[in-house]
Image (cartoon, grey):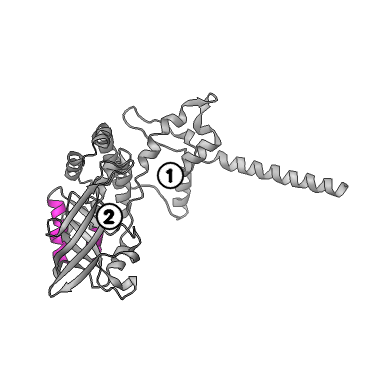
């Protein structure tokens, strides 16, 4: 019995020690309760100085730092101001009407907040992925639907930037920088979703042209695009890595049918539709990259659609810090804190 008691006492001591270490670690973590309103015009989410200290220590010892450069901070402020002044005041109306936010897109185009990855040689800013993420996150701070409408061009541009010829880039990327036009990335299908290996849209060689047949689904900018990037199967017998080829297809090509507008929860003004291709003739000069390399081109396309949750963090913030649960802020309760913190992961 004495040995059992001793074992229980030792186990209890270990539990207490662990609990103290966990509490100490939690004290150093930034909680939603640390988020504050920095101004009456815009909702700014700032964390404790804990992370700033970590960044400074990392730089001092030659390690990685997440501190933004002056240029990146300038882009961040420009995009945030645009979201506060041009997006937020009209976001609810566009969500209600489900209309494409063309006036907002045009203003953003004039300010250089869209098509940011297009190289300078073709009229763009030639910004990197980090800068694109910064801008996209701030635009999403205003409205995810409007942000998607503004940023979807990047999906179609990426394959052209990665695999296009100089002539293709001049023609199709140049269009987007010369006028506030849209482009669409046509890959997903009703029966395959984003599973590229299961796509059924085909492209058959006809001399110096190709005939494209098939149906694409959930295509952002589908009804407003000037041109499409289309992934089609050119070798039905080959494995997925060599079966597909990419094409640039003008939206006004004969044989293209645009389906009804889909209603997307939280992004109702984003134009999402099905696109049907029926014997659509595409010149070989519009083939993007080598035959059978379409899968590789898509795999290299850098994902840029992971920042649309900014508004989802912004909007519940006032409620999280308001004293509504047991006369204390909701974010001070473990369950609320966990949900709020993991929503940004």
Residue 252: quarter of image = bottom left
Left or right side of 258 for 131? right
Q: Which residue is rendered at x = 30% and y = 60% of the image?
A: 301
Q: Nearer the viewer, residue 3 or 270?
A: 270
> Can residue 238 be seen in the rendering of this structure?
yes
Left or right side of 211 for 20? right
Q: Which residues are magenta?
A: 157-178
Q: Residue 285: x percent and y percent? A: 14, 69
Left or right side of 115 for 12? right
Q: Residue 334: x percent and y percent? A: 55, 37
Q: Which mark is residue 192?
A: none
Whichever of labels 1 and 2 marks the residue nearer the N terminus, that label is 2
> Can residue 116 be seen in the rendering of this structure?
no
Chief secondary structure of the magenta portion: helix
Element under label 2? Answer: strand
Residue 169: quarter of image = bottom left
Element under label 1? Answer: loop
Q: Is residue 172 above or below residue 320?
A: below
Task: Provide the residue designation for mark 1.
Answer: 344
Task: Provide the residue designation for mark 2.
Answer: 217
Q: Which residue is rendered at x = 23% and y = 73% of the image?
A: 291
Label 2 Cα neighbours within 10 Å, binned few <14 / some 14-19 / many ≥20: many
Q: How many marks?
A: 2
Q: Residue 141: x percent and y percent? A: 33, 39
Separation of marks 1 and 2 at Cα, in angstroms: 28 Å
**Do callouts 1 and 2 mark residues in contact (Cβ within 8 Å)?**
no
Seen as rendered, the residue at the extreme top is: 327
Q: Is residue 284 above or below residue 33?
A: below
Q: Residue 180: x percent and y percent? A: 15, 47
């Amino acid at each position: 019995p004495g040995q059992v008691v001793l074992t229980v006492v030792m186990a209890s001591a270990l539990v207490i020690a662990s609990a103290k270490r966990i509490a100490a670690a939690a004290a150093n973590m930034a909680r939603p309760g640390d988020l504050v309103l920095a101004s009456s015009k815009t909702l700014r989410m700032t964390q404790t100085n804990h992370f700033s200290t970590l960044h400074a220590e990392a730089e001092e010892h030659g390690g990685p730092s997440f501190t933004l450069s002056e240029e990146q901070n300038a882009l961040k402020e420009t995009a945030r101001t645009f979201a506060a002044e041009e997006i937020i005041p009209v976001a609810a109306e566009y969500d209600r009407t489900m209309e494409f936010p063309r006036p907002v897109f045009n203003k953003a185009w004039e300010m250089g907040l869209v098509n940011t990855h297009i190289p300078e040689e073709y009229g763009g800013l030639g910004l990197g992925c980090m800068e694109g993420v910064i801008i996209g996150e701030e635009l999403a701070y205003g409205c995810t639907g409007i942000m998607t409408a503004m940023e979807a061009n990047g999906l179609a541009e990426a394959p052209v930037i990665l695999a296009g010829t100089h002539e293709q880039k001049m023609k199709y990327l140049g269009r987007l920088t010369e006028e506030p036009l849209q482009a669409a990335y046509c890959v997903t299908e009703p029966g395959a979703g984003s599973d590229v290996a299961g796509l059924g849209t085909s492209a058959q060689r006809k001399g110096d042209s190709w005939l494209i047949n098939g149906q694409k689904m959930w295509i952002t900018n589908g009804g407003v695009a000037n041109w499409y990037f289309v992934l089609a199967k050119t070798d039905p017998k080959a494995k997925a890595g060599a079966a597909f080829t990419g094409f640039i297809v003008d939206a006004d090509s004969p044989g293209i049918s645009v389906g009804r507008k889909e209603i997307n929860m939280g992004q109702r003004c984003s134009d999402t539709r099905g696109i049907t291709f029926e014997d659509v003739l595409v010149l070989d000069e519009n083939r993007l990259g080598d035959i059978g390399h379409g899968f590789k081109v898509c795999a290299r396309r850098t994902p840029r659609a992971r920042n649309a949750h900014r508004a989802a963090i912004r909007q519940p913030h006032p409620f999280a810090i308001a004293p509504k649960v047991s006369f204390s802020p909701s974010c001070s309760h473990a369950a609320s804190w966990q949900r709020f913190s993991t929503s940004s992961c």
